[in-house]
Image (cartoon, rainbow, N blue to C red):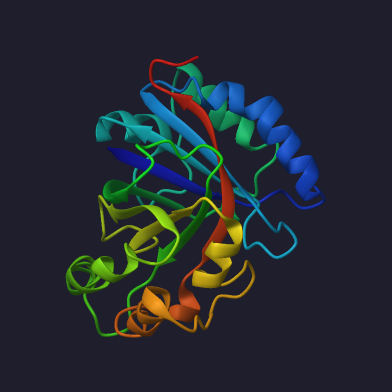
Amino acid sequence: MYKHVALLVRQEGMTHEEFVDYWQTNHTPIAREIEGVVRYQQVLPTEPEHAEFDGLAELYFEDLGALHDALGSEGSRDYDPEKGKAKEAREDVDNFLAIDERPRFIGEEIVQKDTVDGDTDGLYKHSAFLVRQEGMTHEEFVDYWQTNHTPIAREIEGVVKYNTVVPTDPDNAEFDGVAELYFEDLEKLYDALGSEGSRDYDPEKGKAKEAREDVDNFLAIDERPRFIGRERLVKREGER
């Protein structure tokens, strides 16, 4: 499944609460009907005052061409769809988003662990937008991440679902990948991965400690945005 993740930043002069109200009330009914979208989920920050972004919008497509037509290709933050709901949604984002401050990522999702049968509505999620260390190629990064780090991270205490998202166009992507870890309990997430606003963290035991020590082998920690929020399922194919 191909996935477009937009890291949303509100316009200047708008409060977080005003942003969420517009996003949910005005924009969501348009975006959920964009041509080709088979799943649409949003992530709202658990601690807005400490969050690096105001929210995440995640739209899934079965076809990469359909994604590009609707939301632009990797590397192009702006895009100009010519028709339909994609055009309407593009025009509407100018009403509430700071476009130039909104990172985005297009990738292919790989499910590494799933004990909830894909039902993530209401779960707490830690999304790490990964940047490789200096001197490491993207291919070397992905190899280490998937081969060495993923077997550790998927066993972190409290993790009920774990996805990795690999860019479809690494040469133009803003990040080298996205790691998504889901928890049913927010405190377990904080214990394992730190709270919102703290990019670094120091778990004391178990797989969380082992995973934290291992990230120093391949990640540029200070350049890695992260986001902790609660997921809200807006659309799943076959549901209205």
- The residue located at (72%, 49%) in the rendering is 11
- The residue located at (59%, 52%) in the rendering is 229
Q: Which percent across, then down, holds residue 216?
A: 36, 85
Asked whether 153 or 139 is in front, the reply is 153
- The residue located at (37%, 25%) in the rendering is 38
Asked whether 84 or 193 is in front, the reply is 193
Q: Is residue 70 left or right of residue 150?
A: right
Look at the picture and state if 236 lies above or below 198.
above
Asked whether 54 or 181 is in front, the reply is 181
Task: Say which quarter of the image contains residue 162.
Answer: bottom left
- The residue located at (29%, 46%) in the rendering is 109
Q: Quadrant of the N terminus?
A: top left
Q: Which percent across, then down, holds residue 151?
A: 24, 67
Q: Is residue 74 left or right of residue 151?
A: right
Look at the picture and state if 177 lies above or below 131.
above
Q: Is residue 45 left or right of residue 79?
A: right
Total labels: the figure holds 0
Q: Which percent across, then down, holds residue 6?
A: 50, 47
Look at the picture and state if 158 lies above or below 88.
below
Q: Which percent across, then down, holds residue 95?
A: 70, 36
